[in-house]
C-alpha cells in the first residue's frame, strides 16, 4: 500500500515522497500492516472552492480523502492530486509549507493526528 508523504527538509523546503506500507499480517480476511500510532480522529468537510494559501502543517497527521480528491503543492513546486481513498502523511511543520486546494468538488476527509 502506498502513502503519499509531504515533509520539510532541514532548510524548510517541502517535498513529496512515497512510503510503501509493509503488510505484515496475512489471513483469510486479507493483509494488514503493523499497528501505527494515532492520537485521535477528526472528520472534515471542505467546500468545492476551498483554497488554503502557503502554510506549514499544524501537526503530523494522516489525511484520507473519502469522496473527492484535493490538490497539494509542495514548496519545491511539485503538485499532486490526492485521490479518493488515497492517504497522505503530512509532516511539513516548518518552513514555507504547502498550498492546498479543492478540485471543484466538496470533499469529506478523515484526519488522524499522530503526535
Image (cartoon, rainbow, N blue to C red):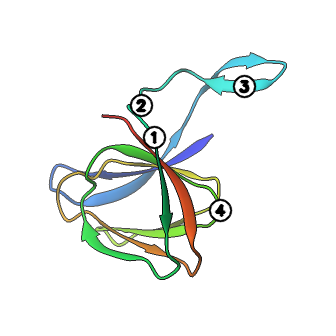
Query: Could you tell me which residue is drawn at 53 percent across and 56 percent down?
Result: 109
Indicate the quadrant where residue 16 lies.
bottom left
Describe the element under mark 1 as helix, strand or loop: loop
Q: Relative to 14, is 48 on the left or the right?
A: right
Describe the element under mark 2 as helix, strand or loop: loop
Measured in 3D between alpha carbons, the distance from the residue under mark 4 to the one under mark 1, in whole angstroms, is 17 Å
Instruction: Give whichever of 59, 41 is nearer the camera.
Output: 41
Indicate the quadrant where residue 108 lies.
bottom right
Q: Which residue is mark 4?
A: 67
Describe the element under mark 3 as helix, strand or loop: strand
Query: Could you tell me which residue is drawn at 43 percent across and 77 percent down?
Result: 50
Describe the element under mark 4 as helix, strand or loop: loop
Q: Which residue is mark 1?
A: 41
Measured in 3D between alpha carbons, the distance from the residue under mark 1 to the one under mark 2, in whole angstroms, is 8 Å
Quarter of the image where the N terminus is located: top right
Q: Which residue is mark 3?
A: 31
The outermost residue toward the right is 28
Determine whether label 3 and label 1 are within 8 Å by CB. no
Determine whether label 1 and label 2 are within 8 Å by CB. yes
Which numbered tag is attached to residue 38? 2
Vertical order, 36 against 84 (above or below): above
- Which of pointers 4 and 3 lies earlier in the amino acid sequence? 3
Measured in 3D between alpha carbons, the distance from the residue under mark 4 to the one under mark 3, in whole angstroms, is 24 Å
Query: Could you tell me which residue is drawn at 24 percent across and 59 percent down?
Result: 56
Measured in 3D between alpha carbons, the distance from the residue under mark 4 to the one under mark 2, in whole angstroms, is 22 Å
- Which of pointers 2 and 3 lies earlier in the amino acid sequence? 3
Instruction: Give whichever of 46, 34 is nearer the camera.
Output: 46
Q: Residues within 10 Å of mark 4 (few under 14, many from 20)?
A: few
Amino acid at each position: 500500500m502506498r502513502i503519499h508523504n509531504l515533509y520539510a527538509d532541514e532548510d524548510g523546503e517541502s517535498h513529496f515522497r512515497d512510503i510503501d506500507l509493509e503488510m505484515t499480517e496475512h489471513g483469510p480476511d486479507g493483509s494488514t500492516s503493523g499497528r501505527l500510532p494515532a492520537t485521535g480522529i477528526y472528520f472534515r468537510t471542505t467546500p468545492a472552492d476551498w483554497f488554503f494559501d502557503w502554510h506549514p502543517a499544524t501537526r503530523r497527521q494522516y489525511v484520507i480523502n473519502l469522496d473527492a480528491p484535493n490538490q497539494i503543492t509542495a514548496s519545491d513546486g511539485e503538485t499532486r492530486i490526492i485521490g479518493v481513498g488515497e492517504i497522505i502523511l503530512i509532516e511539513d511543520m516548518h518552513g514555507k509549507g504547502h498550498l492546498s486546494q479543492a478540485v471543484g468538488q466538496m470533499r469529506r476527509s478523515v484526519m488522524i493526528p499522530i503526535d
